[in-house]
Amino acid sequence: MLNEFFYPVADGARYALDLGCPFSHARDLFYEHETHKEPVRHSKLYWRSLYSGKVFKSEYYVDKHMERRHGDKIPSTADVCLADYCDVLQCDKHAEYVKNGRGSKPTRCDEEQMSLVRDKCHEMLTQCFPNENGSTRDNAGKLNVYFTKYYCDQMTCADVDGVFELMSAHHDSPGVGYYIALAFLFFIVAMYYLTVYSWTNGRRVSSDIKRARVRARASWSDYLPRPVARRFNLERRKRKTY
């Protein structure tokens, strides 16, 4: 959820999350390890440690390898397990959203519990995007207002099921100018290749015409072997050019 809806918005606003934000990468207990492992290409099970290059038969075993051999790589500032914020991040609903490509099905909901989650969400925003003077002109203020309106305020039994569809609808999308520029670029490329094709095709036709003219001027004696033509004095005299 953070990679899809949180970090891209903060990065797009060129806002650097400090250590006061629990979602800062520097505070994530597993960020260092997660960024140093990868699935093996053309395999559904095997994973590779980027520290040592070793391959393991599942993600579970590469995680255990990280804990056992590379625990010293975790920075001293890392003190947050993101799973502790799954109530705010709506981990289960996001997993279902990714799987089904749409909002999760309505489930039983406790309004009082959702109120606590909403308060925790607002507290998280205050830590990540402090807005002490109440101004919305700076990036922190704008981000605070954005996430408050489109995420934290949706933490109600009536709205939480559609929160990810709402967030995805507010992702930045290319404007009309982008598509005009793209169409112009395709036009220029098409004209370039059309010009190259016409030029090369014209040269080929011109060459064919020259060869045809030479063949048309040739007589039967031009096709005889040169020694034979010389023996019977049939070789054509070359014209001098001045």
Image: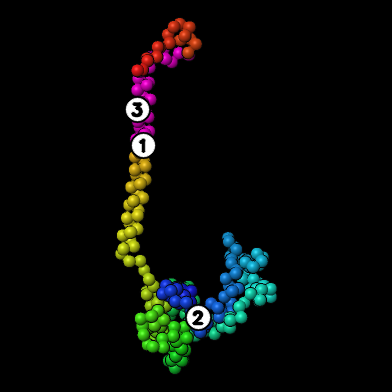
Taking depth in this image into account, of 97 and 141 the one nearest to the observer is 141
- The tag on residue 18 is 2
Residue drawn at x 59%, y 66% is 39
- Quick check: 224 above or below 17? above
Whether residue 242 sits left or right of residue 81 in the image: it is: left
Dot 1 amino acid type: Asn
The picture quadrant where one finds residue 134 is bottom left
What is the residue that sits farthest to the top in this orientation?
Answer: 232
Earlier residue among tags 1 and 3? 1
Q: CA distance from mark 2 to mark 1?
A: 62 Å
> Can you give x and y, in whole percent of width and height, for residue 99 in the image?
48, 73
Work out which quarter of the rendered image holds the C terminus and state it. Answer: top left
Q: What stretch of residues is rendered in magenta? A: 201-225
Residue drawn at x 32%, y 56% is 183
Tag 3 residue = 209
Binning the other alpha carbons within 10 Å of mark 3 as few (below 14), some (14 to 19) or many (20 upward) gives few
Binning the other alpha carbons within 10 Å of mark 1 as few (below 14), some (14 to 19) or many (20 upward) gives few
